[in-house]
Image (tube, coloured by chain):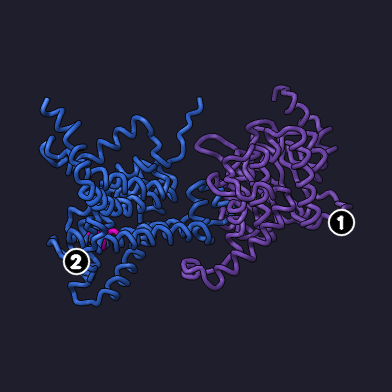
Chain colours: A blue, B purple
């Protein structure tokens, strides 16, 4: 009885009596949700354009952050380190296309998926070989003050992160909508053969997509690294993007964003208000259970293309 | 194969396929196929189901690489032809089972046909400056002409996945035309259409041929349409060439009649 009470009554009473606190929890959740969104965005880009589920996306976040923080620690100014890391991520896209994708073109999806698992472990190893396995703080001079809106406390760094993520998404959408390469990317995502027939070079498009996914990973890595430091567990946290994708739909960019926000806010609220009843650590599994429930009722996700079975 | 053309519309040879052999594993799809297509003509490829017609088009635009033989286009040998090369050198096509970009609008679909004609760099596009912006506007104008020509103004902004079948076929033709091809390959452009839609499509094909001087290779099942439109017809059956000539010659050929009526081989 007491257990039921702690699940169905107490949390709501707490929310009701301290709405500012609830708002702070939700806001904090939304901020980590943005990080999930950024990683999920990288997955969606590659999945849409090449049908490849890129298991290495999480490690790409780590790899980008490692290079960035490594170069800064080596004494480079932040801007130079940033440009150098961007170049590294673009070079990585070229290498992946040349060494992996080109040789596996037209193979089953599962084979490409296996290849990305290989890429993931290779990158993790390469990162550790070059930069070592230490946890490194990343300080890029984000403001660390707080604002008060009414009684609600807001971290300036989180607002900054949200602004960066937001502008990135808007810039990407405009690019996809209004440029020749953006249109070609969407075309390749829809139909390979038709894209080939109008002369769109698939190899070139894959490089662009992986490079853009690399840049998104870099942004996610910087944001995450400056919050929780750069460490190898980044790549596992990034796997939270999977439930985000199930929620948002694998092919939808807005889906990735909104899915990330829902999961970020949901798991924080669950942890804070229901954590006590379950003995804590709800945050660890909340996202996956939510995804499982979604799979039962809406397998294509919130924004995914409807799955129509023809008999 | 070299009957003289009195029609001034038709010029010299634009494309030829020579001794094409194509097989998948042990299955032979095409055996020793040769024919040519002259500049400005409408050339049909016909034959019963499974005769190898679509395979033939796929060889011409490089989706399939034949084991033997080569494709000659504008006086140049292509062994093998590749889709990218075909598009670059002026061959456009449509597909039997419509291959459009379903999530994109009609306008965007047709704009992809301009891909090779646009040259702005990645940086220019990312910042939407210089050539990127200018080109978008220029090519948009050309695309609007094609939209007018095919009378699809009303569906400009509609995602093509939502359009009825007949209109999708028309958008696919529009996308191919946007490439301003010298040779247009049409794989069953009228399959599944009703009579009125077929008549419209026939009219567009004739207009494209006459107004733009585009050479057309056409696969079609409707014999009435084929006989009306074509300058010359090549007949395939079981991957072999059965006959080649004017519509009249072909339709009076005994082998062709047998193949279509199912007399034993």
Q: Which labelled disc corresponds to residue A284? A: none
* Residue at the image point whose x is 27% and y is 57% from the top: A61
Pick whichever, B145 or B59, lies toward us.
B145
Query: Residue A80: percent from the left, percent from the top?
Result: 29, 75
Is B74 displayed left or right of B86 in the figure?
A: right
Query: Residue A260: percent from the left, percent from the top?
Result: 32, 48
Pick whichever, B118 or A176, lies toward us.
A176
The answer to whether dots 1 and 2 both sit on one chain is no
In which quadrant of the rendered view does residue A274 lie?
top left
Q: Which residue is mark 1?
A: B8
Is A92 situated above or below B196?
below
Q: Which residue is mark 2?
A: A138
Give the chain of mark 1: B
Pick whichever, A257 or A79, lies toward us.
A257
Is B149 situated above or below B165?
below
* Residue at the image point whose x is 74% and y is 41% from the top: B234
The range drawn in magenta is A220-224
Structural distance between the alpha carbons of marks 1 and 2? 75 Å
Give the chain of mark 2: A
């Amino acid at each position: 009885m007491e257990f039921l009470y702690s699940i169905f009554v107490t949390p709501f009473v707490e929310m009701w009596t301290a709405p500012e606190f609830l708002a702070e929890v939700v806001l904090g959740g939304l901020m980590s949700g943005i990080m999930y969104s950024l990683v999920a965005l990288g997955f969606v880009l590659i999945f849409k354009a090449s049908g490849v589920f890129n298991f290495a996306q999480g490690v790409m976040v780590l790899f980008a952050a490692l290079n960035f923080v490594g170069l800064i620690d080596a004494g480079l100014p932040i801007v130079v380190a940033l440009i150098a890391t961007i170049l590294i991520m673009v070079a990585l896209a070229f290498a992946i296309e040349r060494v992996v994708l080109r040789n596996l073109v037209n193979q089953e999806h599962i084979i490409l998926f296996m290849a990305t698992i290989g890429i993931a472990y290779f990158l993790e190893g390469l990162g550790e070989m070059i930069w070592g396995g230490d946890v490194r703080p990343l300080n890029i001079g984000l403001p660390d003050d707080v604002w008060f809106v009414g009684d609600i406390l807001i971290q300036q760094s989180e607002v900054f992160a949200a602004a960066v993520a937001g502008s990135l998404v808007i810039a990407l959408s405009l690019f996809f909508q209004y440029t020749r390469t953006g249109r070609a990317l969407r075309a390749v995502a829809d139909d390979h053969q038709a894209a080939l027939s109008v002369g769109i070079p698939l190899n070139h498009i894959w490089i662009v997509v992986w490079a853009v996914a690399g840049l998104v990973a870099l942004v996610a890595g910087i944001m995450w690294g400056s919050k929780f430091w750069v460490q190898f567990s980044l790549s596992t946290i990034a796997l939270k993007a999977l439930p985000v994708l199930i929620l948002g739909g694998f092919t939808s960019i807005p889906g990735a964003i909104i899915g990330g926000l829902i999961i970020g806010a949901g798991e924080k609220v669950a942890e804070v208000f229901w954590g006590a009843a379950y003995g804590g650590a709800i945050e660890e599994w909340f996202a996956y259970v939510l995804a499982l429930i979604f799979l039962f009722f809406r397998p294509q996700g919130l924004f995914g293309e409807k799955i129509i079975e023809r008999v | 194969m070299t009957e003289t053309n009195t029609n001034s519309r038709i010029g010299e040879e634009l494309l030829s396929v020579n001794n094409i052999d194509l097989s998948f594993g042990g299955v032979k799809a095409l055996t020793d196929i040769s024919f040519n297509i002259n500049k400005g003509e409408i050339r049909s490829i016909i034959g019963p189901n499974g005769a190898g017609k679509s395979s033939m088009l796929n060889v011409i635009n490089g989706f399939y690489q034949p084991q033997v033989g080569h494709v000659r286009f504008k006086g140049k040998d292509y062994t093998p032809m590749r889709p990218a090369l075909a598009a670059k050198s002026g061959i456009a096509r449509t597909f039997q089972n419509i291959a459009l970009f379903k999530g994109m609008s009609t306008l965007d679909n047709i704009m992809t046909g301009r891909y090779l004609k646009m040259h702005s760099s990645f940086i220019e596009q990312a910042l939407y400056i210089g050539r990127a912006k200018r080109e978008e506007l220029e090519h948009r104008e050309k695309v609007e002409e094609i939209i007018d020509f095919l009378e699809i103004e009303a569906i400009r902004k509609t995602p093509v996945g939502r359009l009825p079948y007949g209109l999708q076929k028309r958008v696919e033709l529009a996308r191919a035309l946007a490439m301003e091809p010298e040779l247009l390959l049409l794989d069953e452009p009228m399959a599944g259409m009703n009579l009125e839609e077929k008549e419209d499509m026939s009219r567009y094909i004739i207009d494209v041929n006459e107004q733009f001087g585009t050479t057309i290779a056409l696969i079609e099942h409707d014999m009435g349409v084929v006989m009306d439109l074509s300058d010359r017809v090549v007949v395939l059956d079981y991957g072999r060439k059965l006959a080649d000539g004017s519509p009249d010659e072909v339709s009076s050929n005994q082998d062709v009649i047998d193949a279509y009526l199912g007399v034993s081989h």
